Amino acid sequence: MSDFLAPPVPVVPAPFHTPEREKLQEQARAFAAERVLPLADQLDKVKGEIPRSLLDEMAELGYFGITVPREHGGLGLGAFEYCMIAEELARGWMSVGSIIARAQGAGTGVADGSRRAELLRRSAAGTWIGAIALSEPDAGSDLAAVATRAVRDGDDFVITGRKRWTGNAKAADFIQVLVRTEDPQPGERRSAGLATVVVEKERDSFPEGVTGRPIDKIGYHGFVTWDLEFDGLRVPAGNQLASGDQGFADTQQWLNIARVHTAARAVGLARGAVEDCIVYLQEREQFEHPIGDFQAVRFKLATMAAKVEQARSFYQHVAHRLDQGEPCEREAAMVKLLATEMAAEVTGDGIQLHGGNGYTTEHRVERYWRDARLTTIFEGTSEIQQKIIADRLLPRSPLG
């Protein structure tokens, strides 16, 4: 077809554009297209894991240390670049856009300065990639209900309990665990007595005192998600990162950035659906015309593309504000809510525009939809984001 149009690619707009960001975006886009997407096409169908060789390539590009300071071997960049790269990687395979969140200095905030510096260097180099164990069977959205216990015994904590939805746990270098060291006293917040502890481990195994059961998911393949049982696991007390209200606050701050990161990944997935539809609607013919000639189809695609652009602009705005030092708890919840719901809708529309072919594994759009559907659930469901937003807009009267 002589007038075949290739999908447009996003560029960093003013006032956020810099030559450095443009170069970084182009690099990530090429890596996603040439290295990530072919692996996703091959491995997602068989629920395969991201190859270690690809993680090594990502480490060479600095993707595990985007936000780690330069003096520790990182790129020394901010949430904006972190989310921008995540969008490009998620366009290829969401799990690749996700695995970078398990470094970026996570699990390094120990009290000992020399140990902290060593872990930061490892994080930036991609040799300190972790797993985050927050949720439990009875504590998901309500993290203050965490019941996993860490009891002090000499120089160690002894951890007992169960964690659920811990992605990458067995393949990781460490597991960052939210635990309860004591019960809150009368009048204290429910988050009192919580602490974050780092469990260092060998890759592809669990330490003594930890067992795991894989959770079979419909999507988000690339790494295994685990249900973990802690039974008398001993961890050095020096591996504690934070405790009490500070530990809970640190978790909430981490979730603010994670929610904007999730919005960026959602945009990458929705963008994949739009770009694939642009190609498909020009190739697929019915009634002696490409189906892209029909107005109902054209208008559907136009609306999809507009929603993706809107969500991208919003996450870039919030990421910029985070880099300026603003907490943005409400705004992070807003962009997570809108971008992820958009992605679920747009990828679903992408299946519809592919017709029966969209309901097969012969086209990528079904993968985009399966992964996009999860973004409305993890890092706080859409309903939790609505609660966060509403609680900052309206007073709450006691229910009686």
Image (spheres, rainbow, N blue to C red):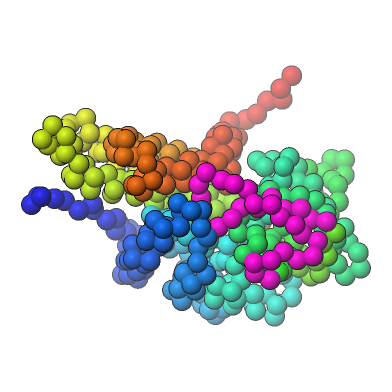
Residue 225: x %, y % from top left: 61, 53
- Seen at 55% across and 72% down, the residue is 126
Is 259 in front, or is 53? 53
Magenta part, dominant SS? loop
Question: Does any portion of residue 259 appear in the rendered image?
Answer: yes
Is 327 in front, or is 280? 280
Q: Is residue 219 left or right of residue 245?
A: left
- Seen at 24% across and 45% down, the residue is 280
Residue 150 falls in image quadrant: bottom right
- Seen at 68% across and 25% down, the residue is 397
Magenta stretch: give its range. 202-231
Quadrant, the C terminus: top right
Residue 48: x %, y % from top left: 51, 58
Question: Does any portion of residue 309 appear in the rendered image?
Answer: no
- Seen at 45% across and 73% down, the residue is 57
Residue 253 falls in image quadrant: bottom right
Residue 72: x %, y % from top left: 56, 78
Q: Is residue 351 left or right of residue 102?
A: left
Is 288 in front, or is 319? 288
Is residue 324 depicted above or below 187 in this figure? below
